[in-house]
Image: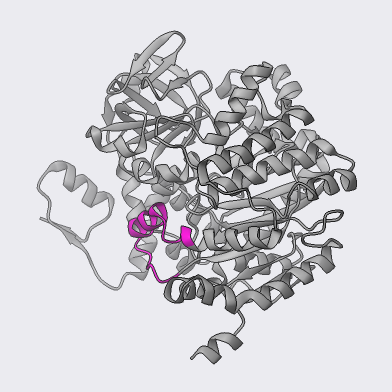
């Protein structure tokens, strides 16, 4: 048994238009690893790397850390050497170091459920080498402070000590911003970043009792183990139970050479969708940040800008920004970097045709070069699911059977959720405007903490920004409201996957967790106060708003018609009210009584 375990492949390499795996191997390589291999094979520029299989996660859980790490040691060393050869760098070298990212990847998309570590391989010597090599000292120290922050959180467990507290690293950063009179991370000087690195390491030593690890091989081992442990973390277990995924699937580990979006004004990072994940509209959309790394967009640390010009113009209308101001201060990627945009647009078209489904992609721009970090079938609302399936069928992208297979029966229930009565909206008191991150209508009492979402029968979870730890509360709440983040933030992506109403990036909100208050334009709202969210417009409304039953779309009728064509059994429904009868007729039951 052990001999078999020691001889099978556990590490699969990809990059330079070659790969050991492909998109059919999701069970073994996870969705992310399989898609990275596939993209490499079809000529999409992905940073080279390797995937540690899901089977190693299972071995880790069954046999323990030493056995699992022993099984993969030689293969990982070989894969790192391959990366060194491709990149022309050396892992652990102080002058020309190879830096890597470590990400999880289960066989199904679990957005925000697992953790990412970027810039792994940095230490006090390597940061000096990177600064000299790139002739960009600010970039080097910014990367180092990011690495300590991520590694401290993900691997060393540096979480807030109580739910009223903010992230311990963010607390240090906010204190320095206040002292320096600045607002953005990008305003930090090189000396500020050096001070943050020192303060971060001091915080790690104080909290954990140990120095921050400096050996890159120790750093890599710790990150791999953290990914395996995250598979059985509370939020991953809850997500699996919520979706009926087995616990024995395990997660793969994806290791890639770093590419940098934080090298200056010609670099950046973003998230994009080949179609609108909220409405299903066939329009390329997404968000980006200049001089940033990938987690910045999803985490909602800064509210990002739109990728397309039409998306930027739509955003400006919602944000009440004049066109002149928009073009000068909030330009789209299409306007700011037209060549990069053209290339990105070509890749999104190619990937949707290849996978025959709406794609959710992450990308990085490093000094004018575009890299695609991942692609996956995008999470979508019930309404978007129906529209995308029917539109894709009409466009010839998929056939009738494939269209039906894209319909998740449990998500059809979202189409029956009540919507706000237009008459009531005319007299509603709109207190603030955010981004319509996930459509729907939600009314509930304000709660500020995810673990208290069940305190009221109808609650609205109000956060500065959400994190993966908030998953259970997001699922319980009727709607989600965040002060930061855009249409591709954690709150937005998870809410759409749940079919939950969400308004994000409402910058006018001042949220005080300790005193449990929400302040807008000088008016204070408290925990337990009623508010309403319009996920289609981004309006935040004081008090309750009356609702009515929704009108079902034409695409919904087309799905029902197509279902009848391939149905192998007929359905009849027992109804107890006129409302039940209406629903039964909408679903075209074969008989009611």
- Percent position (x, y) of residue 245? 38, 64
Q: Give the side of residue 369 with respect to residue 155, left or right.
A: right
Quadrant that contains the C terminus: bottom left
Based on the displayed image, in which of its 4 quarters is residue 72 positioned?
Answer: bottom right
Q: Position of residue 491 (x, y in %)?
A: 47, 39
Give me the residue at 60% from left, 70% from top.
52
What are the residue bounds of the magenta stretch? Answer: 229-249
Percent of width and height locating residue 145: 68, 40
Query: Is residue 408 in the magenta section?
Result: no
Task: Residue lying at the far top in this picture: please name it.
Answer: 522
For the question of whether residue 161 can be seen, the reply is: yes
Residue placed at 61% from the left, 69% from the top? 34
Q: Quadrant of residue 354?
A: bottom right
Return the residue found at the far front.
Answer: 209
Tell whether position 240 is magenta.
yes
Q: Is residue 395 left or right of residue 132?
A: left
Q: Nearer the viewer, residue 43 or 15?
A: 15
- In the visual, does 534 lie left or right of 399? left
Quadrant position of residue 84: bottom right
Question: From what the image shows, is residue 104 above or below residue 581?
Answer: below
Residue at the (36%, 70%) spot, across then down = 566
Name the residue nearer the viewer: 235 or 337: 235
């Amino acid at each position: 048994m052990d001999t078999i375990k020691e001889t099978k492949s556990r590490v699969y390499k990809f990059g330079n238009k070659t790969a050991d795996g492909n998109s059919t191997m999701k069970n073994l390589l996870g969705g992310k690893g399989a898609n990275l291999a596939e993209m490499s094979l079809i000529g999409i520029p992905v940073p080279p790397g390797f995937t540690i299989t899901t089977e190693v996660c299972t071995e880790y859980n069954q046999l323990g850390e030493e056995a699992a790490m022993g099984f993969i040691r030689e293969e990982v060393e070989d894969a790192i050497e391959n990366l060194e050869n491709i990149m022309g760098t050396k892992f652990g070298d102080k002058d020309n170091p190879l830096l890597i990212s470590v990400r999880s990847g289960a066989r199904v998309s679990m957005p925000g459920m697992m953790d990412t570590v970027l810039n792994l391989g940095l230490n006090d010597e390597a940061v000096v080498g990177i600064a000299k090599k790139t002739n960009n000292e600010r970039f080097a120290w910014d990367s180092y402070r990011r690495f300590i922050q991520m590694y401290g959180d993900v691997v060393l467990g540096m979480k807030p000590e109580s739910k009223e507290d903010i992230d311990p690293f963010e607390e240090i950063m906010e204190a320095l911003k206040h002292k320096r009179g600045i607002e953005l991370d990008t305003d930090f000087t090189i000396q500020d970043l050096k001070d943050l690195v020192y303060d971060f390491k001091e915080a790690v030593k104080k909290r954990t009792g140990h120095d921050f690890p400096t050996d890159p091989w120790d750093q890599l081992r710790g990150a791999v183990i953290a990914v395996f442990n995250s598979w059985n973390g509370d939020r991953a277990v809850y997500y699996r139970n919520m979706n009926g995924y087995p616990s024995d699937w395990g997660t793969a580990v994806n290791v890639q050479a770093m590419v940098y979006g934080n090298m200056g004004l010609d670099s950046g990072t973003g998230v994009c969708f080949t179609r609108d994940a909220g409405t299903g509209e066939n329009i390329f959309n997404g968000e980006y940040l200049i001089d940033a790394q990938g987690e910045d967009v999803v985490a909602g640390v800064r509210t990002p800008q739109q990728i397309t010009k039409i998306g930027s113009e739509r955003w400006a209308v919602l944000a009440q920004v004049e066109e002149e101001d928009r073009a000068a201060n909030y330009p789209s990627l299409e306007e700011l970097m037209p060549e990069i945009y053209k290339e990105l647009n070509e890749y999104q078209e190619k990937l949707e045709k290849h996978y025959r489904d709406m794609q959710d992609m992450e990308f990085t721009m490093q000094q004018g070069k575009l890299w695609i970090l991942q692609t996956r079938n995008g999470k979508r609302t019930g309404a978007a699911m129906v529209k995308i399936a029917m539109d894709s069928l009409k466009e010839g992208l998929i056939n009738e059977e494939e269209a039906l297979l894209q319909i998740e029966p449990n998500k059809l229930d979202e189409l029956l959720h009540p919507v706000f009565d237009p008459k009531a909206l005319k007299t509603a008191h709109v207190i603030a405007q955010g981004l319509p991150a996930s459509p729907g209508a939600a009314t509930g009492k304000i709660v500020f903490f995810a673990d208290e979402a069940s305190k009221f029968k109808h609650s609205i979870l109000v956060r500065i920004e959400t994190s993966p730890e908030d998953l259970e509360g997001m699922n319980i709440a009727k709607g989600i409201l965040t002060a930061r983040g855009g249409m591709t933030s954690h709150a937005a992506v998870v809410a759409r996957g749940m079919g939950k109403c969400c308004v994000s990036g409402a910058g006018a909100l001042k949220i005080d967790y300790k005193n449990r208050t929400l302040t807008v334009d000088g008016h204070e709202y408290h925990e337990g106060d009623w508010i309403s969210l319009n996920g289609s417009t981004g309006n935040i409304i004081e008090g309750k708003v009356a609702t009515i039953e929704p009108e079902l779309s034409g695409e919904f009728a087309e799905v029902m018609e197509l279902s009848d064509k391939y149905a192998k059994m007929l359905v009849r429904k027992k109804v107890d009210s006129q409302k039940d009868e209406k629903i039964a007729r909408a679903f075209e039951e074969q008989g009611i009584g």
